Image (spheres, grey):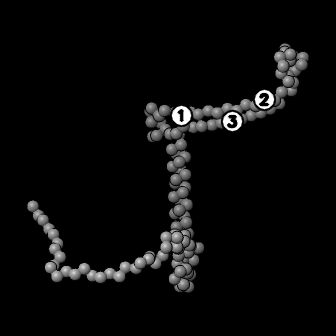
Amino acid sequence: MVAAGCMVGPDYQRPQVDAPQAFRFEPTDTAAVADLEWWKQFGDPILDGLISEALASNKDVQIAAANVEQAAGVLTTTRAPLFPQIGYDGSGGKYRFSENGTTDLATGIDNPTDVYQVLAGASWEIDLWGRVAG
């Protein structure tokens, strides 16, 4: 069995620390600094130029970010068959029945008449054999 420890000597004196009564930044100021161009607070034109150049010319990072977004889109498209598919459709029209045909217009149907149709559906394939997931 091994034991280790650390002991403070008998003449240890806790140092006096002058803690400020208030923080340097209030929480609202801190949030404002985090949301803005934080490097401008240093007032260094060289730093401003370097960051401006990096933001304008750093195509590799922009390309990498675009590739990540593209990969996320491909993943979403690839996984889509695993989830229920929902669809809807609607149609409408004005129909006129023949007055010479076999239709009985005495039933109270206006001629011409408006017809509206709304359809909704959902489907989901249970992947018993692993066709979708594989």
Q: Nearer the viewer, residue 64 or 16?
A: 16
Measured Cα–Cα span from mark 1 to mark 3: 18 Å
Amino acid type of disc 2? Val
Q: Which residue is mark 3?
A: 89
Q: Position of residue 46 (x, y in %)?
A: 53, 84
Q: Which residue is mark 2?
A: 115
The total of numbered circles placed on residues is 3
Say whether residue 46 is visible.
no
Image: 113 above or below 78: above
Q: Secondary structure at mark 3?
A: strand
Q: Which residue is mark 1?
A: 124
Asked if labels 2 and 3 touch by Cβ distance under 8 angstroms, the answer is no
User: Counting other residues with Cα less than 10 Å from the Cα at mark 2, is it few (<14), some (14-19), or many (20 or more)?
Assistant: few
Q: Nearer the viewer, residue 92 or 35?
A: 35
- Residue occupying image coordinates x 60% and y 37%: 86
Q: Secondary structure at mark 1?
A: loop
